[in-house]
Amino acid sequence: MQKIKKGDTVVILAGKDKGRTGEVVKVMPKDDKAVVRGINLVRRHQKQSAQSEGGIITKEAPIHLSNLAVADPKDGKPTRVGFKVQEDGKKVRVAKRSGELIDG
């Protein structure tokens, strides 16, 4: 089970967007990276093609997972993630800061 999943709200710990929060759009476990909506925006020159218009486009670039922390469901501050096995045998993610379950 991964600590950061698609749909999680994360806090950026390092880089130009430090302190900002956003939702994880895509996780790339093999590269240890994630794409966060509205964070780490880069501008790329794109050549015109049949499908897309040419020009300078802005898109999100991947961020290394070490620079992300899951936002605590209680107060929104960065927290570490732990795992807990419930009485029904299900493994769930838990915020170390508050002890609350991380839904997702």
Image (cartoon, rainbow, N blue to C red):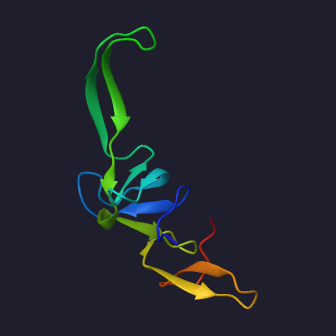
Name the outermost residue toward the right. 88
Q: Position of residue 78 (x, y in %)?
A: 42, 72
**Identity of the residue drawn at 33% across and 12% down:** 54
Q: Quadrant of residue 33?
A: bottom left
**Identity of the residue drawn at 36% across and 34% down:** 59
Q: Position of residue 41 (x, y in %)?
A: 32, 39
Name the outermost residue toward the bottom. 87
**Identity of the residue drawn at 63% across and 81% down:** 91
Please give left or right for residue 93 compared with residue 58 in the image.
right
**Considering only vertical position in the picture, is 89 above or below 17?**
below
Q: Position of residue 102 (x, y in %)?
A: 59, 73
Q: Quadrant of the C terminus?
A: bottom right
Closest to the observer, 76 or 93:
93
Please give left or right for residue 16 compared with residue 38 in the image.
left
**Identity of the residue drawn at 37% across and 47% down:** 39
Q: Position of residue 93 (x, y in %)?
A: 57, 77
